[in-house]
Image (cartoon, rainbow, N blue to C red):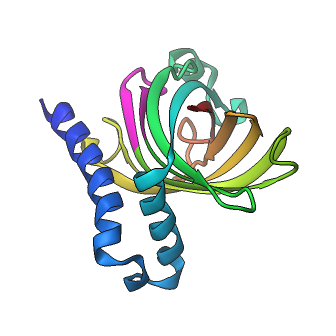
Amino acid sequence: MIRRFLRYVIAGALAAAASGAQALGCGDFWSLIARPCAKGAAAWDHGDNELIVTGYAYHLRSTYTEEKLRELNERAVGLGWARSITDPDGDKHMLFLFGFHESHNKVQWNAGYAYTTFWGPQDGLRAGLGFGAFIVQRPDIASGVPIPAVLPLAALEYGKATLLATFIPTLNGGINNGSVLFVFGKYRF
């Protein structure tokens, strides 16, 4: 029941943030947030729909014990939905919501904004770098309470398909935590 409630809270917060951004006027925010706010609102209003498919979480072997690696799930299967817009220069802005089976086979929910700048021809294979700023909810972090996070993004795009990856670092300096390469994809309709 609490998980269902948190899912609705995350989805509602994403929708409210996107529609509320226009009502507030994104220029009211600090300059660092004003552009993502405006682009997120634009993505929500008239962006393309995208299907997100998750699939793989590679745990760096040097930061985990063999015993722990045998316990962990690396098939991070999940689905989600996004709305995105493309700037005239080819940069992408995306609002997203997706869930997947994390390392301990529990569902992790993510809702937020991502920005990626690309190099290469817009009609061919392109590489990109960016970041995602989002709310994450998983049972083993903060007692399941949604928390904010920011992670780097790397992308390869061809046509309507994009392969994305991010790296979750070890924050506490300990072994058996973090240091995960997460790979997922999206398809624009």
Q: Is residue 72 visible?
A: yes
**Above or below — where is 84 with respect to 73?**
below
The residue drawn where x is 26% and y is 57% is 16
Stretch in magenta: 97-110
Name the image quarter holding residue 148: bottom left
Toward the viewer: 91 or 129?
Answer: 91
Q: In what quadrant of the picture does the N terminus appear?
A: top left
Residue 52 in the image, given as x and y percentages of width and height: 52, 31
The residue drawn where x is 76% and y is 50% is 128
Q: In what quadrant of the picture does the C terminus appear?
A: top right
103 in magenta: yes
Residue 74 vs residue 8: left or right? right
User: Which SS type dominates the magenta stretch?
Assistant: strand
Q: Is residue 134 visible?
A: no
186 in magenta: no
Count of labels shown?
A: 0
Residue 58 vs residue 29: left or right? right
Residue 17 in the image, given as x and y percentages of width and height: 32, 61
Furthest residue in direction top, as rendered? 70
Furthest residue in direction front, as rendered? 46
Residue 156 vs residue 138: left or right? right
The residue drawn where x is 52% and y is 19% is 73
Residue 68 in the image, given as x and y percentages of width and height: 54, 23
**Above or below — where is 155 with respect to 81?**
below
**Above or below — where is 78 with respect to 132?**
above
Residue 48 in the image, given as x and y percentages of width and height: 52, 43
